[in-house]
Image (spheres, coloured by chain):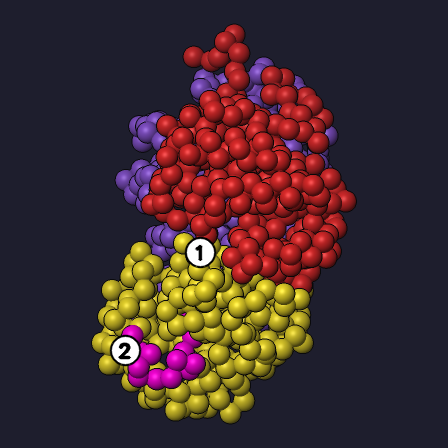
Chain colours: A red, B purple, C yellow
Amino acid sequence: MSILNYLPERPEKPRSSGINMVMDKGIGMNQAHDVINTCGFLIDFMKLGFGTSYVNPNVKDKIKLYKKHGIKVYPGGTLFEAFVIRNQFDDFLKFLDKLGYNAVEVSDGSMKMNHDDKCKYIERLSKEYTVLSEVGSKQAGVEMSTDVWANQMKTEREAGSFKVIAEARESGTVGIYDSTGKPDFALIDILTHAIPMDDIIWEAPQKSQQAWFIKHFGANVNLGNIAPTEVIPLETLRLGLRGDTFFEPLPDNLKHS
Amino acid sequence: MSILNYLPERPEKPRSSGINMVMDKGIGMNQAHDVINTCGFLIDFMKLGFGTSYVNPNVKDKIKLYKKHGIKVYPGGTLFEAFVIRNQFDDFLKFLDKLGYNAVEVSDGSMKMNHDDKCKYIERLSKEYTVLSEVGSKQAGVEMSTDVWANQMKTEREAGSFKVIAEARESGTVGIYDSTGKPDFALIDILTHAIPMDDIIWEAPQKSQQAWFIKHFGANVNLGNIAPTEVIPLETLRLGLRGDTFFEPLPDNLKHS
Amino acid sequence: MSILNYLPERPEKPRSSGINMVMDKGIGMNQAHDVINTCGFLIDFMKLGFGTSYVNPNVKDKIKLYKKHGIKVYPGGTLFEAFVIRNQFDDFLKFLDKLGYNAVEVSDGSMKMNHDDKCKYIERLSKEYTVLSEVGSKQAGVEMSTDVWANQMKTEREAGSFKVIAEARESGTVGIYDSTGKPDFALIDILTHAIPMDDIIWEAPQKSQQAWFIKHFGANVNLGNIAPTEVIPLETLRLGLRGDTFFEPLPDNLKHS
């Protein structure tokens, strides 16, 4: 149905740019089918947010459904940390296996973790799972120097992370954003020069954040923490079919005056 | 089930006042059935917002379902503009036909358009479709004099628009509202004196905006950009069955002190 | 699936602490089944918010479904008030019976009501229904002395209320919160000393409010006005499996430094 001219190219799955990482906070099977049938082809990673997959009794069926449609599924990093802080990493491995996850997130947003230890977890888990690792704190006001951000991202990629995630929480008000949700351009600029753009997934739950990244880095920037109901609206932002990014790739000869 | 006394009268479909225009941003069929089964009788127009119907593979089935229940369905005006700015108006006509739309929106919120041209589009499209046209910019800070607002609304109605829409976006923070979502009373007052009240659909996505219009213009004011999940809550606002508009038509002899 | 150590105990239904009161504003049957299948076991009370059950044609089926899964269902207190202010209390009784409700809310958030009268309604209704009564105004700026709050809660419990609800609205910006949603600690402190903690349900629609109550009063504080989509996320807050309350019951010997 490609009728409109001048639309940006969008790669198909499996892809390494233009990735959508979506956050499911406990939706039921009717909605999960709706998600698959409307925008399954646009979703690369589905995160069952924080500890929700420990609570939701439906989670096995949902993981199965998502995997069947070519989506990598993983539990939010907070659950990984909940096991680690209790010295129950082996139980975490059993948990991943029992539920049928095919990806995993390694993070240290809610607890202190030695960075070498974090990299060992990445290395260990990357033997069996697609690993995403996350850099940045969930706490407002916990500052990390930009050098440390960039360095951790590099070493985590080398340890086996498929992509590194720049933290923003579900709210989009910490990490790479200030408390009002505005992007920290200086930090983002340094990160994009330190490691390849395609290696980063930017958490961008708010529409204004999504539009900002698309305007600055193009239609195929990797974005994360997208709500299931916002995947299709996000695709229109990527294609320039919504007011916020309307026809951004407009050729000069078409510009109206 | 009309047991409660002193409820405002609400006209049935098809109606020309008390209209609800609802915005679907890409919901799936399970939710679409939920919408129909709970509040289909309350929905007059369903807008498949901005470019979402260009992306969502399910859109034909959804349009069919909505039409079957007496709802006029149309793509968001931004998609009309996306075709026009590319000089692809003929392709837009094919697109409307292929998907089975029975209504259309003509807007110039994201691009500059000569107003005579806009009226010609309205005239042309009104031969086959129910046309809604929209006045006002999506950009914050783009001011239009109130005279121009009123004049454009008049001439667009004459050109063939069934109703004219007063712009506010999905967020409710531009056009007839300030950046915090507060109604621009001076502008609204002038518009209501320039053209008949029933000819205008006010975009009012926020609850406080809906309550404001109902308090000022009564239970049967035409409202738009309502989220599918807010149609029933809005109906309670119209009927005075929610705190914000509680029993507004209270007769004197029933007032408690 | 209880693998994680050091999780707080959560009582099973029927329970008198750790209660979730959830607000349904008119969802359809597909979503209602999703709610039941993902978190029905976590829901004690389902409120069909304000007047929505007067409007939604599906409401009988939904009440049946909820009751079948051990949930007490009742119409929002605003609807009770809508009948009372019209002197139609007998019609309200018919309405409750016809729809199959098994609980009811007695409130005076939108109208003035003599407190003796309110207690008589509680007494009368508690013969047939589980009664929740609500204290506090829906109007911003309507102040009630903390003594009056505490006293009304006590007498309403004595009149037959199963629990008393501390008002906050769907928005969480009145009653026990200020206009920005921050808890009024002085008021809350006095209420918890005046009547037993387990007798109160705190309306807490915002995540920050839920986290605040859990941090101050533990995993099993009674919370209300939870959105259907937030019940599972709330459970992770109660269990310390989300950033905001992460591992709050952390034993000293496990603390990382």
Residue A75 appears left or right of C93: right
Judging from the image, what secondary structure is the residue with disc 2 in? helix
Image quarter of residue B249: bottom left
Return the residue nearer the eye: C110 or B118.
C110
Residue A174, visible in the rendered structure? yes
Q: Amino acid at mark 1?
A: His
- Residue at image position (42%, 25%) is A189
Q: Chain of mark 1?
A: C
* Quadrant assignment, res A57: bottom right
B86 above or below C23?
above
- The subunit carrying tag 2 is C
Q: Which residues are magenta?
A: C189-207
Residue C190: mark: 2
| Left or right: A162 in relation to C106 | right
Residue C253 lies left or right of residue A53; in this view the side is left
Pick the front one: B182 or C14: C14
Could you say which is closer to the camera, residue A167 or residue B110? A167
Expressed as whole percent of the image width and height from the top left, the position of residue A221 reads 55, 28
Farthest residue in the right direction?
Answer: A68
Which residue is denoted by mark 1 in the rendering? C256
| Quadrant of the drawing holding the C terminus of chain B | bottom left
